[in-house]
Image (spheres, rainbow, N blue to C red):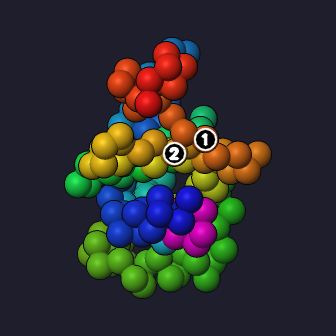
Amino acid sequence: MERALDFLRRHNEVAFATVGGEGIAVPKLRIFQVMKQEGTTLYFATSARKAVWAELQRNPNVELVAYADNISVRCAGMVNFHVPDDVKRWIYDHNDVLSRLYERYDQMEYFALSIAEMDYYDLSPTPPLFLHFDLMTGETGRGFVGERYDKSRGNE
């Protein structure tokens, strides 16, 4: 799991998925930046005027994925909106983009994702490596990487 968390530390720009729409669930995807990482908790900032904030208020379930060099890390869970003030200040003070867009840290909204599930997928080796981490139960498993390496079929 540390390999996946380290990858996230080094690749903080992620595709971030929410559920939007009224009545009908419509997936919405955008690029977000992980502003701070503490263990398995990821912190983000946005504006209350953006659609993503309203989507999170209606449905806090999200997924994100980071990708580089044949490796991807996918995380899923439910965001919460209880971010300590000192963390908000740290995020604002340590991100150049935020200070260009907002005059003060308290003009933004902050939220945290405590990762519930995480997948680490590395296509570089043969066979590829696919690890699934369920952080709620503590279980780790190997995922399906292709027919050639499907143990249920008697392969590898």
Q: Which residue occupies the foreground of this view, 141 or 69? A: 141
Figure label count: 2
Are the two marked residues, 2 and 1, in contact with CB atoms closer than 8 angstroms? yes
Q: Which kind of residue does numbered mark 2 sit on?
A: Leu
**In the image, residue 150 above or below residue 68:** above
Query: Residue 96: horizontal and vertical position, in percent?
Result: 29, 79
Determine the residue positioned at 63% across, 78% down.
85
Determine the residue positioned at 51% across, 25% down.
151
The N terminus appears in which quarter of the rendering? Answer: bottom right
Residue segment shown in magenta: 37-42
Q: Is residue 111 left or right of residue 80?
A: left
For label 1, the SS is: strand
Q: Is residue 110 visible?
A: no
Q: Which kind of residue does numbered mark 1 sit on?
A: Gly
Query: Residue 81: horizontal and vertical position, in percent?
Result: 64, 57
**Crowd band around label 2 with a 10 angstrom C-alpha radius: few (<14), some (14–19), many (20+):** some
Q: How far, Cα to Cα, is label 2 from label 1?
A: 6 Å
Determine the residue positioned at 45% across, 68% down.
6
Indicate yes or no whether the magenta region holds residue 87: no
Residue marked by disc 2? 131
Question: Predominant secondary structure in magenta?
Answer: strand
The C terminus appears in which quarter of the rendering? Answer: top left
Residue 27, disc: none
Residue marked by disc 1? 141
Q: Which residue occupies the foreground of this view, 126 or 72? A: 126
For label 2, the SS is: strand
Q: Is residue 21 left or right of residue 97?
A: right
Res 52 → quadrant: top left
Q: Is residue 141 left or right of residue 129?
A: right
Res 83 → quadrant: bottom right
